Image (cartoon, grey):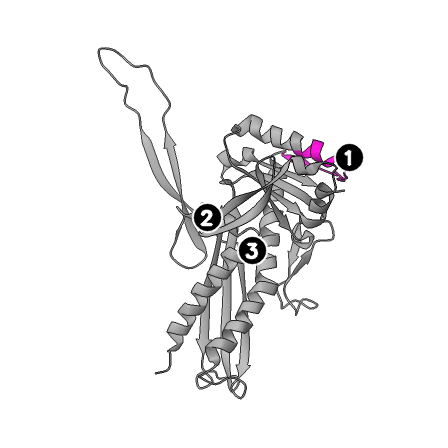
C-alpha cells in the first residue's frame, strides 16, 4: 500500500529536524531549549522562575516564608523562512518518491538551510554580547597574540560566572589554523567528548574548553537574509552585510544560548493534487530563532576582527 502524504510529511519533518541538530555547528544550542514549549506556529513559551532571597532564621518561630513564582513568557520566532520545490512526475513515481525527495530536501537543508541558521545564530550572539559590552573589537589574531587574548577573555568570563561553568569556544576555521600554528600549542590542546543533545562527538579542547570550528562565511556580525521576491534577490539565501565584521571567536557558557529550530511544515502534494504542474510539490517552512536570557549574558564574550 502506498504511504499517504501525511505520513510522508511526518517522516520528512522528523528526519530534517535530526539532520539540523547533527550537522549545524550550532546544533548543540538546541539542547538548551528542553524546557521551551512549542505547539506549532511562530511562538514559543519559555519558563521564568523567580524566588525571594535568604532571610534570618528565628530559633523560636523557625523559617521565614519565602515565595517562588513560575511563569511563561511568549517569544516570537522572528526567522520565518520557506521554499517550494517541484519534482516532475515523469522523473519521480510513487515507488521512488521517498528516496528522491529525501535526497533533494536533505541536500537543500545541508547546503542552504543549515549554513543560514548557523550564520543567524552567531551574528545574533555577537550582537547581544556587543550590547552588553562583552566584545573585543578590531583584533587581528596571529601566532604571537592569540593565546594571550584567549586566556584574557576566558578569565573575564570565569571571573563573573565562576570556573565550574562549562564553556564552549566557537572559532572561525581560519583563526583555528592560526591557533594551531602557535609554538608548543600541543601543551594546551587535548581531545574530549562533546555532547550536543543526543549526539556525542570528539572535539579538540583548549585548556579543557571545547573548540568548535565554524566556517568563516557563517561567522560575521551581520547578514542580509534575502526574501526571494525583491528584484535581485530571486535566488533567496543570505549573504554578509556590507558593514559586517568577521567574528574570530565566541566564548560562552554552554547553557547560555537557547536555540529553537522547527521544520514547520513540510507539505507534500501529489501530481494529481498539484494544480500548477504534473509534478510532486514539496513545501518547506522553517521557523527558528535564538535567545540568551539576561542572567546568562554575562557568560558570553565575542572577539571580532577589524
Q: Quadrant of residue 110?
A: bottom right
Secondary structure of residue under mark 3: loop
Q: Which residue is mark 2?
A: 31
Q: Residues within 10 Å of mark 1 (few under 14, many from 20)?
A: few
Q: Which residue is mark 3?
A: 24
Q: Give the x, y percent position of residue 42.
A: 46, 57
Instruction: Name the image quarter holding the C terminus.
Output: top right
Secondary structure of residue under mark 2: helix
The mark nearer the N terminus, 2 or 1, is: 2
Q: Is residue 147 magenta?
A: yes
- The magenta stretch spans which residues? 134-150
Q: Give the x, y percent position of residue 292.
A: 52, 41
Image point 55% across, 27% down: which residue? 160
Q: Nearer the viewer, mark 2 or mark 1?
A: 1
Q: Is residue 130 above or below residue 22?
A: above
Secondary structure of residue under mark 1: loop
Image point 52% across, 43% down: which residue? 257
Q: Tell me the CA gap for discs 3 and 1.
A: 31 Å
Q: Residues within 10 Å of mark 2 (few under 14, many from 20)?
A: some
Q: Is residue 274 above or below residue 287?
A: below
Q: Nearer the viewer, mark 3 or mark 1?
A: 1
Image point 32% across, 31% down: which residue? 68
Q: Give the x, y percent position of residue 271.
A: 47, 85
User: What's the mark number on residue 144?
Assistant: 1
Amino acid at each position: 500500500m502506498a504511504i499517504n502524504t501525511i505520513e510522508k510529511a511526518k517522516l520528512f519533518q522528523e528526519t530534517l529536524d535530526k539532520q539540523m541538530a547533527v550537522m549545524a555547528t550550532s546544533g548543540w544550542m538546541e539542547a538548551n531549549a528542553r524546557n521551551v514549549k512549542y505547539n506549532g506556529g511562530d511562538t514559543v513559551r519559555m519558563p521564568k522562575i523567580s524566588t525571594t532571597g535568604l532571610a534570618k532564621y528565628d530559633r523560636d518561630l523557625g523559617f521565614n516564608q519565602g515565595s517562588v513564582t513560575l511563569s511563561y513568557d511568549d517569544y516570537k520566532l522572528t526567522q520565518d523562512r520557506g521554499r517550494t520545490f517541484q519534482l516532475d512526475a515523469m522523473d519521480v513515481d510513487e515507488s521512488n518518491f521517498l528516496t528522491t525527495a529525501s535526497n533533494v530536501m536533505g541536500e537543500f537543508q545541508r547546503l542552504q538551510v543549515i549554513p543560514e541558521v548557523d550564520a543567524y545564530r552567531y551574528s545574533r550572539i555577537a550582537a547581544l554580547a556587543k550590547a552588553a559590552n562583552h566584545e573585543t573589537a578590531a583584533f587581528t589574531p596571529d601566532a604571537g597574540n592569540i593565546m594571550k587574548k584567549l586566556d584574557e577573555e576566558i578569565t573575564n568570563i570565569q571571573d563573573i560566572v565562576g570556573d565550574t561553568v562549562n564553556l564552549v569556544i566557537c572559532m572561525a576555521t581560519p583563526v583555528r589554523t592560526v591557533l594551531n600554528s602557535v609554538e608548543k600549542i600541543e601543551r594546551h590542546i587535548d581531545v574530549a567528548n562533546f555532547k550536543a543533545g543526543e549526539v556525542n562527538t570528539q572535539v579538540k579542547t583548549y585548556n579543557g574548553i571545547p573548540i568548535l570550528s565554524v566556517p568563516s562565511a557563517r561567522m560575521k556580525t551581520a547578514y542580509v537574509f534575502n526574501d526571494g521576491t525583491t528584484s535581485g534577490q530571486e535566488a533567496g539565501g543570505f549573504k554578509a552585510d556590507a558593514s559586517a565584521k568577521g567574528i574570530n571567536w565566541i566564548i560562552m557558557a554552554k547553557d547560555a544560548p537557547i536555540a529553537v529550530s522547527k521544520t514547520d511544515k513540510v507539505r507534500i502534494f501529489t501530481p494529481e493534487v498539484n494544480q500548477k504542474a504534473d509534478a510532486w510539490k514539496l513545501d518547506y517552512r522553517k521557523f527558528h530563532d535564538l535567545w540568551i536570557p539576561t542572567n546568562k549574558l554575562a557568560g558570553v564574550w565575542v572577539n571580532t576582527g577589524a
